[in-house]
Image (cartoon, grey):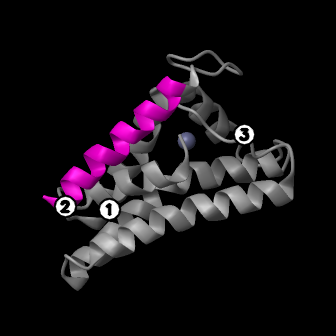
């Protein structure tokens, strides 16, 4: 799953879980659960320069939406929302370290990540584009619903 839906899902958790440590653990767990859903992802291995652009655009989109929504919340809640969003994408940050180190670092964690990715969609295969996009739109819609209610 791309980063913006993960960020929004982690941010949405902050509306229900107010303890920072529990929120962090829940956002990490939710990341892996969401990765089980068939989803489309962009390629980050073809070109490092293109990967940096895609990742930056993805995070920026997530942050713009979150900063816009955060105005509705008190400062303490805003901090929790950012905290949830951060832990919502942390597994992908750790996976990026594994990938860009060519498997030198965080190998076990990468295997754990891939385990969740491949529960429905086999390794190195992709779901149909319509399905891969729809699942992420549903995550975004559910997250926005929780954040804006
Ligand atoms: Zn992931």
Sequence-wise first label, 3 or 1: 1
The answer to whether 136 appears left or right of 147 in the picture is: right
Q: Is residue 138 above or below residue 91?
A: above
Which residue is located at x 29 percent, y 66 percent? Answer: 20
Q: Which residue is mark 1?
A: 21
Q: Is residue 67 above or below residue 139?
A: below
Tell me which corner region of the image, top left, top right, bottom left or bottom right, holds residue 83. bottom left
Which residue is located at x 34 percent, y 37 percent? Answer: 138
The answer to whether 116 appears left or right of 140 in the picture is: right
Mark 3–mark 1 CB contact (< 8 Å): no
- From the Cβ of disc 1, is ligand 1 less than 8 Å away? no
Which residue is located at x 37 percent, y 68 percent? Answer: 66
- Per the picture, the main secondary structure of the magenta-coloured stretch is helix
Q: Which residue is mark 3?
A: 107
In the current view of this chain or complex, which residue is farthest to the left? Answer: 149
Sequence-wise first label, 2 or 3: 3
Q: Is residue 130 above or below residue 18?
A: above
- Which is closer to the viewer, label 1 or label 2? 2
**Which stretch appears magenta?**
130-149
Query: What is the C-alpha distance between the residues marked 3 and 1?
Result: 25 Å
Could you tell me which secondary element the residue under label 2 belongs to?
helix
Could you say where residue 48 lies in the image, as x and y percent from the top left?
A: 85, 55
Q: Is residue 119 above or below residue 49?
A: above
């Amino acid at each position: 799953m791309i980063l913006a839906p993960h960020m929004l899902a982690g941010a949405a958790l902050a509306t229900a879980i107010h303890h920072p440590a529990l929120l962090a653990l829940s956002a990490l767990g939710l990341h892996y659960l969401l990765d089980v859903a068939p989803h489309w992802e962009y390629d980050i291995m073809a070109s490092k320069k293109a990967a940096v652009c895609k990742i930056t655009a993805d995070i920026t989109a997530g942050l713009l939406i979150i900063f816009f929504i955060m105005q509705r919340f008190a400062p303490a809640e805003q901090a929790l929302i950012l905290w949830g969003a951060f832990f919502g994408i942390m597994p992908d940050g750790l996976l990026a370290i594994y990938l860009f180190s060519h498997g030198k670092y965080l190998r076990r964690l990468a295997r754990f990540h891939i385990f969740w990715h491949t529960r429905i969609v086999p390794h190195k295969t992709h779901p149909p584009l319509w399905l891969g996009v729809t699942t992420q739109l549903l995550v975004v819609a559910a997250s926005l619903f929780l954040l804006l209610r």
